[in-house]
Image: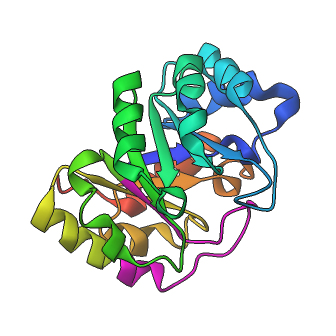
């Protein structure tokens, strides 16, 4: 099956541990943590201390998305706190290869993120160094936004690039993923689906995650 990674940005932080245990019991595959610094994106969220708390609350892989400037300064701290996967934005990567190597050397799986308007051509020479590529299907900074439709074509083109260069790389999509959009996103080639409000805003996490997996269909890998 394809993978569902609920974003705790939409969780109830007054009972975060309970929320994380609930999505694990409901069939989630990864726990997605959105880290924002108020500079790269217009919002401030969480840091390594929250990742530590997430790590203590679950056995699931902890997927940390760094929407921050100078991410290389903080990678060690996030991996030490418990991150299993760490993704950094192509737009911040002056020395992207070095940053990806740092993530792997710290013991985490590296990923690269592209904002909606960022072209794919910057990925060609780094695909061999990553385990996954995260395509933003909304402009990052806030949860609950609507899916940008042309992300489907971008996903299809990325899938072809991955097949040509490094077929084991996963495609992750973040933004506007819900029961109405996930089938089309999956059909375009996505493997991992970040869903915040679609999961945490539902009355039955298990039912929602199960329906998402059914609509996404089986993995082709």
- What is the magenta range? 133-154
Residue 54: give x, y in percent of width and height: 65, 24
Count all numbered tags in the image, as a single digit.
0
Residue 115: give x, y in percent of width and height: 54, 69
Residue nearer the viewer, 176 or 46: 46
Please say if 140 is above or below 118.
Answer: above
Residue drawn at (60%, 65%), measured in percent from left and top? 175
Per the picture, the main secondary structure of the magenta-coloured stretch is loop
Q: Residue furthest toward the left?
A: 164
Residue 97: give x, y in percent of width and height: 34, 48
Q: Residue furthest toward the front?
A: 94
Q: Residue furthest toward the top?
A: 56
User: In the drawing, does residue 131 fall left or right of residue 115?
Assistant: left
Please say if 56 is above or below 138.
Answer: above
Display coloring? rainbow
User: In the drawing, does residue 5 fall left or right of residue 171?
Assistant: right
Residue nearer the viewer, 27 or 115: 115
Q: Residue furthest toward the right?
A: 14
Q: Is residue 117 visible?
A: yes
User: In the drawing, does residue 147 fall left or right of residue 63?
Assistant: right
In the figure, residue 73 lies in which quadrant?
A: top right
Residue drawn at (60%, 46%), measured in percent from left and top? 70
**Magenta span contains residue 145:** yes
**Magenta span contains residue 221:** no
Residue 99: give x, y in percent of width and height: 42, 42
User: In the drawing, does residue 147 fall left or right of residue 15?
Assistant: left
Residue drawn at (28%, 78%), measured in percent from left and top? 157
Residue drawn at (63%, 46%), measured in percent from left and top? 7
Residue nearer the viewer, 140 or 175: 140
Q: Is residue 2 visible?
A: no
In the figure, residue 48 lies in which quadrant?
A: top right
């Amino acid at each position: 099956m394809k993978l569902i990674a609920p974003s705790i940005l939409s969780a109830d932080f007054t009972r975060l541990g309970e929320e994380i245990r609930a999505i694990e019991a409901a069939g989630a595959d990864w726990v997605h943590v959105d880290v924002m610094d108020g500079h790269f994106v217009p919002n401030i969220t969480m840091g390594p201390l929250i990742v530590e708390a997430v790590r203590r609350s679950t056995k699931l892989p902890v997927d940390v998305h760094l929407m921050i400037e100078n991410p290389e300064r903080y990678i060690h701290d996030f991996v030490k706190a418990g991150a299993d996967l760490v993704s950094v934005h192509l737009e911040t990567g002056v020395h992207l290869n070095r940053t990806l190597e740092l993530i792997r050397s710290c013991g985490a799986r590296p990923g690269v993120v592209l904002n909606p308007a960022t072209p794919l051509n910057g990925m060609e020479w780094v695909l061999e160094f990553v385990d996954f590529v995260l395509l933003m299907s909304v402009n990052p900074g806030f949860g609950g936004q609507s899916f940008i439709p042309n992300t489907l074509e971008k996903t299809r083109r990325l899938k072809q690039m991955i097949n040509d260069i490094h077929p084991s790389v996963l495609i992750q999509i973040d933004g506007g993923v819900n029961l109405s959009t996930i089938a089309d996103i999956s059909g375009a080639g996505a493997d991992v689906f970040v869903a915040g409000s679609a999961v945490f805003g539902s009355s039955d996490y298990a039912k929602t995650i199960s329906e998402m997996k059914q609509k996404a269909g089986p993995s082709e890998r």
